[in-house]
Image: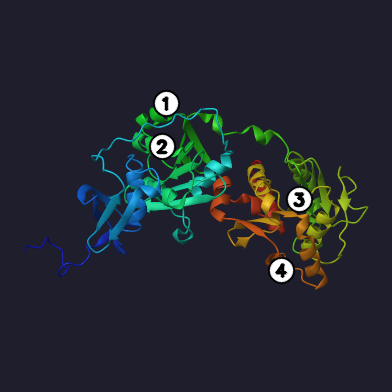
């Protein structure tokens, strides 16, 4: 065999992959994406050949047959056998196997005004959940991902070299595990086609969300079938192509029910050299600007960890620490002890970026947890979090033992962690967690300006 000039490879090794680094082409490590030709037989006869990724083929085949009306329940399958070495799958059905077809069963048409209704951060979060932690926040390359969720949790996840295969896998796993997808969100990394829309409708999915823009036939299909179609999900924004009524933004005008907003006083502020809460800002004091933004979100806002005559200018309740000198943890304890509601949202007086969308999302998760704590760039952020009164005994126990750490009591609580990917989908710059500790931080903040509330 004649080699091309400059090709010095020996034998059948992997081809060299080069990346342009801005100046030149350099070799890079490359792991090829696997593709398998899956020979599917039904009742002993050849049925179809699927080009797919080689994992979890039983979910793929079950979904493929389900979405073509061949099976309706797991009971329709007598056997489903995967022969990994041969790259084939054999299925035995209770009845006769219909002829292979690319068409899908007639779908029920969803009522356009029917729920469930999803808030914008749920739409953003459904796509963010497709990124796995091992990806380091990067999008997958060369592989398609799909997920099914309820706006808060990702119920099913699948990946494949084919975008429709990924949806088939979701359909198959849902069938075999008995998971009802009616009214759920189907999220995908790939472009939504009319075929994918038809599959979603057959599954009862009410909303499809994609990073990419959909095809025109997909928009028409979703419009006809009553499906809300969302695309171009990037940087905290998205476009809605059909039936926008399921995405509700009216809630942002109201206040968060059953939660008290809490501003924790800054303590000695040694690094700043003065009380951070009293720094000049927008014709007033720093803490006043935070209070105004918090008052837009909560019926009551209190300042915790202050003496009775401190901050007399504040138009709200001011409550002292019951464990003086124990720092921010004592402030959380005081807030829980004095609040008129079962839940409180706490923020430090040096954290001026009040992101309403993120705060509402955290508060919405607090029904089944003692604490809802988001993840930032460096781990959990306990001073931008929601706490319930059920956390009081554990907080008090930590304080009595002399432990001031803001995470020192978490092992005794039901803590709902909100993944960094979800936070970034709502607040792409994660500015909500930035605080003002030093004079340099303060002057930089004044120079750059406060980002607008979410």
Earlier residue among tags 1 and 2? 2
Q: Residue at x 51, y 50 (%)?
A: 154
Contact between labelled residues 1 and 3, with CB atoms less than 8 Å apart? no
Eye-nearest disc, 3 or 2: 2
Element assignment for label 4: loop
Element assignment for label 3: strand
Assess disc 1: are there few (<14), some (14-19) or many (≥20) residues with their C-alpha within 10 Å of its C-alpha. some
Q: Which mark is residue 408?
A: 4
Quadrant placement of the N terminus? bottom left
Real-space CA distance between mark 4 and mark 2, rounded to the nearest whole angstrom: 48 Å
Looking at the image, residue 253 sits to the left or right of residue 342; the answer is left
Real-space CA distance between mark 1 and mark 2, rounded to the nearest whole angstrom: 13 Å
Earlier residue among tags 3 and 4? 3
**Snapshot quadrant of residue 348:** bottom right
Q: Name the residue tied to disc 1.
A: 224
The answer to whether 120 is drawn above or below residue 6 in the figure is above
Quadrant placement of the C terminus? top right
- Of all residues shown, which one is farthest toward the bottom? 401
Earlier residue among tags 3 and 2? 2
Give percent across and percent down for residue 211: 44, 42
Q: Name the residue tied to disc 2.
A: 202
Real-space CA distance between mark 3 and mark 2, rounded to the nearest whole angstrom: 40 Å
């Amino acid at each position: 065999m004649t080699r091309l000039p400059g090709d010095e490879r020996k034998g059948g090794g992997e081809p060299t992959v080069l990346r342009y680094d801005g100046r030149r082409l350099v070799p890079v490590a490359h792991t090829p994406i696997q593709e398998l030709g899956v020979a599917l037989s039904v009742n002993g006869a050849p049925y179809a050949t699927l080009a797919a990724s080689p994992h979890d083929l039983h979910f793929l085949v079950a979904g493929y047959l389900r979405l073509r009306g061949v099976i309706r329940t797991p009971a329709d399958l007598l056997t489903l056998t995967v022969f990994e070495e041969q790259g084939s799958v054999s299925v035995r059905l209770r009845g006769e196997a219909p002829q292979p077809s690319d068409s899908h069963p007639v779908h029920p048409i969803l009522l356009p005004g029917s729920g469930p209704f999803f808030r914008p951060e749920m739409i953003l979060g459904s796509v963010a959940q497709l990124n796995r932690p091992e990806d380091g926040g990067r999008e997958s390359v060369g592989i398609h991902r799909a997920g099914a969720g309820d706006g808060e949790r990702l119920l099913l996840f699948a990946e494949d070299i084919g975008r429709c295969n990924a949806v088939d896998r979701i359909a198959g796993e849902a069938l075999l595990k008995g998971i009802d997808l009616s009214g759920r969100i189907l999220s995908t990394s790939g472009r939504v086609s009319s075929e994918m829309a038809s599959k979603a409708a057959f599954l009862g999915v009410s909303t499809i969300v994609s990073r990419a823009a959909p095809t025109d036939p997909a928009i028409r299909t979703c419009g006809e079938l009553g499906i809300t179609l969302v695309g171009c999900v990037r940087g905290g924004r998205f476009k809605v192509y059909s039936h926008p009524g399921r995405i509700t933004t009216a809630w942002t005008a109201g206040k968060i029910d059953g939660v008290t907003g809490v501003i924790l006083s800054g303590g000695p502020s040694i690094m700043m050299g003065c009380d951070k809460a009293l720094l000049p800002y927008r014709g007033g004091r720093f803490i006043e600007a935070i209070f105004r933004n918090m008052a837009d979100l909560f019926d009551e806002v209190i300042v915790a960890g202050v003496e009775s005559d401190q901050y007399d200018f504040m138009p709200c309740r001011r409550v002292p620490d019951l464990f003086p000198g124990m720092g921010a943890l004592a402030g959380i304890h005081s807030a829980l002890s004095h609040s008129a509601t079962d839940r409180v949202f706490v923020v430090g007086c040096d954290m001026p970026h009040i992101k309403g969308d993120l705060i509402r999302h955290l508060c919405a998760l607090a029904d089944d947890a003692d604490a809802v704590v988001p993840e930032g760039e460096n781990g959990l952020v306990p001073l931008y979090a929601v706490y319930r009164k059920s956390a009081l005994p554990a907080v008090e126990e930590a304080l009595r033992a002399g432990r001031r750490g803001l995470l020192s009591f978490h092992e005794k609580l039901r803590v709902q962690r909100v993944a960094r990917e979800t936070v970034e989908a709502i607040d792409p710059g994660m500015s909500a967690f930035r605080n003002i500790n030093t004079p340099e931080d303060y002057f930089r903040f004044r120079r750059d300006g406060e980002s607008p509330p979410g």
